[in-house]
Image (spheres, rainbow, N blue to C red):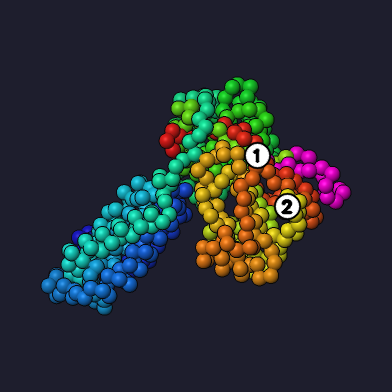
Amino acid sequence: MKDLLRHGARRLRGADHRLLFCGIAAGMWGFGGVRGRRAAVRGVTSLALASATVNALGRHAVGQSRPAQEAAPLLRHLPRKPLTGPYPSAHAASAAAFATGAALESAGWGAALAPVAASLAYSRVRGGGRAPRDVLVGAALGVGAAYAVRGMVPTRAQLPPPARPRVDAPALPEGEGLVVVVNPSSGAQPQLADPVRQLKAALPRAEVVLYEEEAGALPKVLEEAARDVARRGGVLGVCGGDGTVNAAVAPALRFKVPLMVLPGGTFNHFAADLGVDTVADACAAVAEGSAVRADVGRIKPLAGIGPAGRTHTEPSYFLNTFSLGSYPDLVRSREHWSPKIGGPPATLLGVLQILRTGRPLRAVVNGRLRSIWLLFAGNGAYRSVGIAPVRRHDLADGLLDVRIAHGGYFARSRLLAAALAGQLTRTRVYAAARPQRLVISALPEGTQMAYDGEVAAAPAALLIDKLPEALTVYRPTGG
């Protein structure tokens, strides 16, 4: 056993620190849920900045010699003699940066990673390749890199949560009167713990309905659950991704019941903007009766406009985003490849495919004929300034966040160049506005629209507007 421990310590001292932490990050992304994925991205970004800083500045600007390895016992020697200077320690910088970056996003992951980072840093001194000063300075640079990344990209804890307007909602300490519809097929990411088990442990009297495709369409199952909840004066819950949550909006509005959202998909954008990162967050909010009002985006078909035979009467709703143009193609590509290669690679593959084969869409937007690569409308103003949304500060601001990437000569190249240069607002191929309504007409037959990650056939003409503060939804106090 002693020999095994010595061998493990020796392997740790000789490990490639970047591969080690990239492997840990991959595990966090795959099995850590929403917080684990955010912590993994922030940890890797902090590690990259720390490595660049140490390699480009510290290790070439300060000339120092390493401690003599021969002075250390043979079993503590590094497997390979390092070729670079010791000051500061790149291993210690990378370890501290990754652990600190993850901790700034998730205290739990930070606590789990701290012993790994400390062990790796200590192994550099014990192996005879570093002086304590080298390791301490490297660790300080790593911590500084993590905080520098946080300065450029704030963590969720730093961003003001959408806390208004608060509303009275039933408090169900044990979950009596709560009916939760769970879609087990939502998302491509495995979870560390069964959400149903977590729910029953926190709210033992809640009723759980596991949706199965053979039982009928998901909207029908949610409709029946909402009707039952309204009759008893209870709460409708839904566990799944953004598409599953979207399916619960129409029944919640129709029967005027409050909604509990449990994150159970890959990205869970609406739950994240509410501050509901885990099942425990949602359960705590329902137990306390902590809720807010949220706007609902509406897609309303306009009768009498467009080719005959294309009739749509019922409105659709969105809690996050609506889009036309390239994004529906991206969603279809991602859904096709995601089960085979995973969510992020499938998204990247879809983007590359669109850049290669995409064609602009011609439509009339607010009375003007336009050629567009992408039309995006967010339910509320997003904090990003580019074409891609990041997070909303207010879920009840009454506004649409509209962004259009226009077609034209070399439009893709001009748009990409402007985005890389941070000059999107100054290029004529990009436009942004925050209206309360948007009218789109003369859509070609076969046009697809996407809303909350779902793709559907678009009507010939439609109105995009808002239902202000129409939905009551639970969120944790101070979340």
Q: Which amino acid does label 2 sit on?
A: Val
Say if residue 452 shows up in the picture: no
User: What's under tag 1, amino acid-wise?
Assistant: Lys
Disc marking residue 466: 1
Depicted 114 relative to depicted 291: above or below: below
**Residue 408: quadrant of the picture:** bottom right
| Span of residues in magenta | 298-314
Residue extending farthest to the top is: 232
Rendered residue at 23%/70% (across/down):
87
Q: Which of marks 2 and 1 is in front?
A: 2
Q: Whole-percent x and y of residue 84?
A: 26, 76
Residue 30 drawn at (x, y percent) = 47, 54
* Residue at position x 63%, y 63% in the image: 428
Give the residue number, with chain letter if any, for mark 2. Answer: 365
Q: Position of residue 269 (x, y in %)?
A: 54, 46
> Please, which residue is most extreme toward the left here?
71
Tell me the number on the disc at residue 420.
Answer: none
Residue at (59%, 22%) from the top-left corner? 233
Examine the structure image and report whether residue 138 is included in the region drawn in magenta. Answer: no
Quarter of the image where the C terminus is located: top left
The foreground one among 196 and 241 is 241
Judged from the image, the secondary structure of the residue bearing numbered disc 1 is strand
- The vertical placement of 362 against 130, above or below, is above
Task: Characterize the magenta stretch by its predominant secondary structure.
Answer: loop
- For disc 2, the neighbor class at 10 Å (few under 14, some 14 to 19, many from 20) is some
Q: In which quarter of the image is the N terminus?
A: bottom left
Q: Where in the figure is residue 208, as x and y percent of width and height?
A: 55, 33
Which of the 4 quarters of the picture holds residue 353? bottom right
Identify which residue, 340 or 305, lies in the foreground: 305
